Image: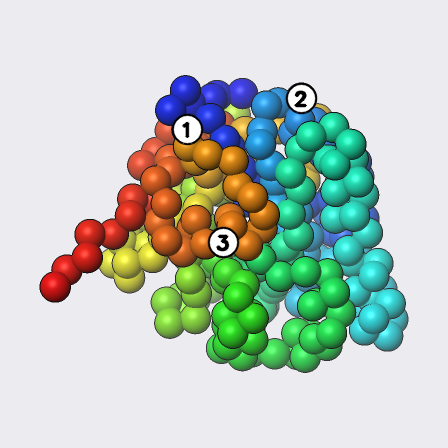
Amino acid sequence: MLQSKDYPFQYDLHVHTSQGSLCGRSTGAEIAKAYQDAGYAGIVITDHHFGGNTRPDRNLPWEEWAEAFCSGYWDAKQTGDAIGLQVFFGWESGFHGTEFLIVGLTPEWMKQHPELRDCSIQEQYQLVHESGGLVIHAHPFRRRPYIKEVRLYPDYIDAVERINASHSNPAVADKPEYDDEAAAFAKKYHKPVTAGSDQHDSVNLRGAGICFKRKMQSAKDLVQAIKNREDSILTDGAVFYPGNRPETIEK
Ligand SMILES: [Zn+2]
Ligand SMILES: [Zn+2]
């Protein structure tokens, strides 16, 4: 894995498991092991939620659905705890192809909020934000058959996924220009940036992530580090990009 001497603590903010995502091809345990071997400090498990390509049966009562949904995370976390990889909980919500990464809330919180199932993008932001979570617009400029149109919600996000390795990393990439557009979008609306692999298996790690100078204490700490634009760089697994810098206070 590409590693920075100055920013040695790398976190992948976009990772799927086979327990939570229909398109996932490796278990949480396999994923955690692979990321530990690659030298990551941590990962956020972001399986496809109710409005996306989710694995659990949508006919289940909410609490049972939520339990099944979280099983990939728990599997990754149990292995991560045993081998020294930080595993944080998150999810990827879907609204007719427009997707968001949610970080900083807990499985328990999710279980207590069945309104997530039918909420709008605006309601999602309010709900997640008032509970201290982070809403990241995932690959905002991706065009694929499952995404009918690019829809932007600068008022309802905290950050922008500026690097998604499935666009940028030359080993797997199709459209680096999608990520360039994401960079311009983040700049225009003054949003912090993040990076993720959009990893769906444990065999060919793409190696993307956001890299910090220090180890994060918790998922909440990671959320604050992004919100506060803590000094960081991004990578798609092949090269590094500028990340966030603390803002200069203008008077
Ligand atoms: Zn997927
Ligand atoms: Zn994804």
Against 83, is 225 above or below? below
Residue that label 2 marks: 37
Tell me whether circle 3 and circle 1 mark residues in contact (CB < 8 Å). Answer: no
Q: Are marks 3 and 2 in contact (CB under 8 Å)?
A: no
What kind of residue is marked 2? Asp
Q: How is the image coloured?
A: rainbow
Name the spot of residue 201 as percent of width and height, x first: 70, 35
Q: Residue, x 46% and y 38% (percent of image)?
A: 210
Q: Tell me which residue sits at (42%, 32%) in the image.
A: 213
**Residue topped by disc 1:** 7
Q: Is residue 173 above or below residue 89?
A: above
> Which corner quadrant holds the C terminus?
bottom left
Q: Is residue 28 above or below residue 189?
A: above
Left or right placement of residue 64 versus residue 100 in this view: right
- Circle 3 packing at 10 Å, graded few (<14), some (14-19), many (20+), is many
Q: Secondary structure at mark 2?
A: helix
Q: For residue 223, which numbered disc appears in the image?
A: 3
The kind of residue on which mark 3 rests is Val
